Image (cartoon, helix red, strand yellow):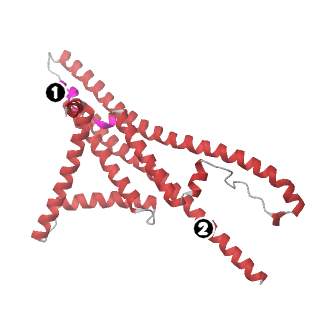
Amino acid sequence: MQVIQETLGSLIQNPVFVGEVVTLLLILLLSGSFAYALHQQDKRKKQSAFSLFVDWLFDGVYQFFEDILWEGSPQWIKSYVVNLFIVILFANIVGLFIDILIFPFPALEQVIQSPTTDITFTLALAIVSVLLLIVLEWRVKWGRKFILNYFPVLWRNTIIISKSWMSRWAYYLLFPFVKLFDIVLSFFLAILDIVGLLAKVISLAFRLYGNMFAGSLLIAIVVTMIANFSASLFSGVNLPLLVPLIFYLQNILVAVIQALVFTLLLSVFAKVILQDAEDIQTKKRASTKGKLIQQVNQS
């Protein structure tokens, strides 16, 4: 019991955890408000402006990512991408409000921090997202192809050699050399694929963290400079909030763009996996069809 109390106490004192809780509460508040608006709509037989706006916004975001992933993609990956966009967007907006309020209330910095300006949060999002990409690849490639992709026990059949292309003696003479080169190439490609997964985690995490942290730092520098300059110019009167309004508006745009970039890259990665699996199935169907035609011609 004491360990649980100490853990909860340390979490409450962590500004990033408080920012995550506030982000979650804002999302729950929006969801609850939308559910209440829909409930009222059933009573009044008329949809409110708020429910219309939220419905239009969510449908637009969902349709946008569905067009990237295509309609035949699994429902769970589309839902994950859309919900991830909402989480990152709200976390960025929380950071924007913190940047605005931190100057009239400097002690707020010790209480709450934007989750996306902390590398552990963005790294956790990136790791979970890449793990889900691995699960997606496992499911669409049906296990064996996936295992051979990252752990080629023998070879991937990257280089194909057939008896129909040459004489029988030439085929048996070249086969060992071709397969040996195929094994070496397969292991090299497997290492590149594993490095590619690590690169995805690093690129997703550090891109979001770097851009949001840089935006927050830029606001702090600009507002501090304007406050000091105005205080010296107007005898103690400073204008730390109104003057850098353009930077606040810029950060709103950055918050939306960075949430979009993270989920857009994730959607592209998932699209590549799905497209690769579709190409494999197409080749299998073409191969099966070719064998059937050959059997019919022989008979």
Instruction: Give the quarter of the figure containing the C terminus.
Output: bottom right
Q: Nearer the viewer, residue 225 or 106?
A: 106
The residue drawn where x is 42% and y is 42% is 127
The answer to whether residue 195 shows anywhere in this view is yes
The residue drawn where x is 33% and y is 37% is 116
Residue type at mark 1? Phe
Residue range of the region highlighted in magenta in the rendering: 103-116
Residue placed furthest toward the bottom: 299
The residue drawn where x is 30% and y is 37% is 115
CA–CA distance between discs 2 and 1?
61 Å
- Please give the label number shown on residue 282: 2
Q: Counting other residues with Cα less than 10 Å from the Cα at mark 2, is it few (<14), some (14-19), or many (20 or more)?
A: few
Instruction: Give the quarter of the figure containing the N terminus.
Output: top left
Dividing the picture into quadrants, the one containing residue 173 is: bottom right
- Please give the label number shown on residue 105: 1
Residue type at mark 2? Thr
Query: Is residue 105 rendered magenta in the image?
Result: yes
